[in-house]
Amino acid sequence: MTSRLSALPLVIVALFVVVLPVRAEEAAKPKTEPAASIKAQLDAKGLKYEVDKDGDFKMIYEMADSKRTQTVFVRSPTFSFGGLEAREIWSPAYRSEDGKLPVDVANSLLEQNAELKLGAWENQGGIAVMVMKIPADASADQLIAAIEGAAAIADGTEKAFSGDKDAF
């Protein structure tokens, strides 16, 4: 009985040595595999990106008419609606202090939604995010147009709310 109990700490240590590196390796893998079609399109256009922990493509887009930058995500997962397979492009513009959008900010974003031809503002946990939804099989030129559109709209809104602050 004593020999079994004295071996227990060694078994526990062995489990940590084997299981913890496997868990860390799993945590480092993206939750969703990056979309090969998006990778090919971004690579063909020479755009720089990184793949985040969710398997999405994250870009820091340099705004052409200023020294500002804007973060844009091209989501790898797609969704279906009425036979259309679609993909989202996100670009954040505003973060609230308490996780809720102030009424004046929310109303401003709703008013902007009425004017937008493609895309809409969403509240994602107190972050105002410009979301463009495009066909999953959009051409590289259509993808780039949506990326540029999301970045321009989000950056303009960020600037309107925060002045010269360039948080995104």
Image (cartoon, helix red, strand yellow):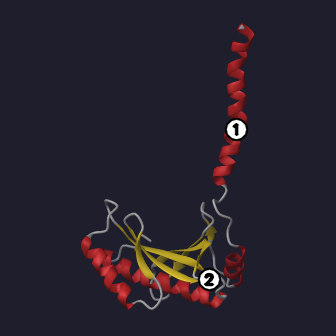
* Position of residue 81 measured from the top left corner of the image (x, y, whole percent): 56, 79
**Which residue extends farthest top?**
2
Q: Does dot 1 land on a helix, a strand or a loop? A: helix
**Quarter holding residue 89:** bottom right
Residue at (71%, 78%) from the top-left corner?
Answer: 37
Q: Could you tell me if residue 167 is visible in this image?
A: yes
* Position of residue 28 measured from the top left corner of the image (x, y, whole percent): 65, 53
**Quarter holding residue 104:** bottom left
Instruction: Answer left or right for 2 relative to 154.
Output: right
**Quarter holding residue 167:** bottom left
**Which residue extends farthest left?**
104
Q: Which residue is mark 2?
A: 83
What amino acid type should be assigned to the residue bearing mark 2?
Answer: Gly
Q: Residues within 10 Å of mark 1 (few under 14, many from 20)?
A: few
Instruction: Out of 138 and 47, give the one closest to the viewer.
Output: 138
Mark 1 and mark 2: Cα distance apart in space: 43 Å
Instruction: Out of 143 and 88, give the one closest to the viewer.
Output: 88
Q: Does dot 2 land on a helix, a strand or a loop? A: loop
- Determine which of the numbered discs, if any, sits on residue 19 in the image: 1
Residue at (63%, 90%) from the top-left corner?
Answer: 141
Q: Pointer 1 and pointer 2: residues touching (CB < 8 Å)?
A: no
What amino acid type should be assigned to the residue bearing mark 1?
Answer: Val
Q: Could you tell me if residue 63 is visible in this image?
A: no
Question: Considering the image in quadrants, where does the C terminus appear?
Answer: bottom left
Residue at (46%, 81%) from the top-left corner?
Answer: 67
* Position of residue 83 measured from the top left corner of the image (x, y, whole percent): 62, 82
- Determine which of the numbered discs, if any, sits on residue 57 in the image: none
